[in-house]
Amino acid sequence: MQPETAAAGSLFKFEIVWHLLTGHVSLITLKIEAKEEIWPLKEVLRISRGSRTETRVVVVTVRDGEHVGRGEGVPIARYNQSCASVIEQIEPIKREKNLDRQLLQNLLPAGAARNALDCALWDLEAKRSSKRVWELANFQMPYCSLRPVGDAHASHSEAATSNPCDLDFVETSFTISLDNPEKMAAAAKRYFESPRARGEPPGPLKLKLYGSDDVDLARVRAVREVAPAARLIIDTNESWSVEQYRQIAPPLKELGVAMIEQPFPVDADDVLQTLDHPIPICADESCHTTADLPCLKNRYEVINVKLDKTGGLTEALQLCQRARENDFKLLIGCMVCTSLSIAPARLLASNADWVDLDGPLLLAKDREHGLYYYNGRVGIPSRELWG
């Protein structure tokens, strides 16, 4: 599957002990290309900062003359990124000799540009070595018994049904777009009533909320009525005030909400040090790289690791390890993206407490060799996709 338009230009405890390799890829100047791709969404996605009907990504390919590595980055408007600015950042890197992942950390700041390049270099190294990325990073992918077969229900990516894998599936949340309570409840009901093999339930629901209109509690109650057994995560995208938090947190606890993501703006989240936390709080916009961790202590219990914020898998591995050492729980998240973006994050998900990797499920169609989604769970990437 090609984009519509394209232009050039299981919850468990586990101690993460990843040993990062030097990541040296080339003794020559690699051929690097970056292009914008536009992927339509299945339906409108609304959050507190606005709505969208498509996602725009930058795909980077890195060639050494024999092998090709790919990576995908999603520019984040919240940080003044666009496809044009990401491609512009990549342009001078094309002239670098002896480029590898470690050098890249010094050449580009954390963000979508470095993410796309870093993941492309990981993929290239995997192709050149005939190993999977988790082998190169020296961590184990656990096995489980779940194996999709035949015409078992796949939430997305029909192409993946012909390429089942014995390696583990992890449970991922599914995003319910911001809307009025009735429409959000209807969306949750549709998701929970979709066909499922052996009666297995889907993963948690992630509800997008908007503190400025005083309807958030009604939204959660409406979803809880149609999904009484669902685990609920709520995400306000920095839209709550302190007074709203004080009013809404206790009843949300009674409704069984399991986690609140980024309730306050980044420049006002220090108040979390003095507020009660009846529900664990997760840092999203407040956490980008390892350097952010000291400021998050005593404010958050969980951090959301997104590769478009860390600037790639290399820094994400470091961030996960340091976060565990500092007693944070891990949520592995994503932007609205294709399976090429999800593939590197999926490796981190096997050792996470929470997983929110539903980006491809929001698309009208995923790319070829997309990840396999099965009963609210997601498998590992195929070699044809990445890594």
Image (spheres, rainbow, N blue to C red):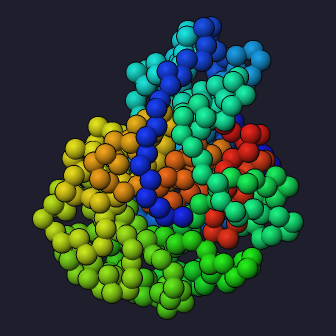
Above or below, 91 against 29 in this view is below
In the displayed structure image, the side of residue 18 where residue 171 appears, left or right: right
Q: In screen coordinates, is 184 left or right of 26?
A: left
Q: Quadrant of the C terminus?
A: top right
- Residue found at x 53% / y 53%: 349
Question: Does residue 151 sit above or below 136 in this rendering?
Answer: below
Indicate the position of residue 150 as horizontal and vertical percent values: 87, 66
Q: Nearer the viewer, residue 80 or 24?
A: 24
> Percent x, y for residue 219?
43, 83
Give the residue displayed 44% in from the left and 53% down from the top.
14
Residue 378 in sight here? no
Total marks shown come to 0
**Horizontal relation, residue 92 to residue 256: left or right:** right
Furthest-left residue in this view: 274
Residue 116 occupies quadrant: top right
Q: Which residue is nearer to you in this view: 252 or 87? A: 252
**Residue located at (48% from left, 70% from top):** 206
Residue 101: horizontal and vertical position, in percent?
51, 24
x then y, percent, for residue 351: 49, 52
Q: Nearer the viewer, residue 364 or 157?
A: 157
250, above or below 128, in the image? below
Left of 73 or right of it: where is 20?
left
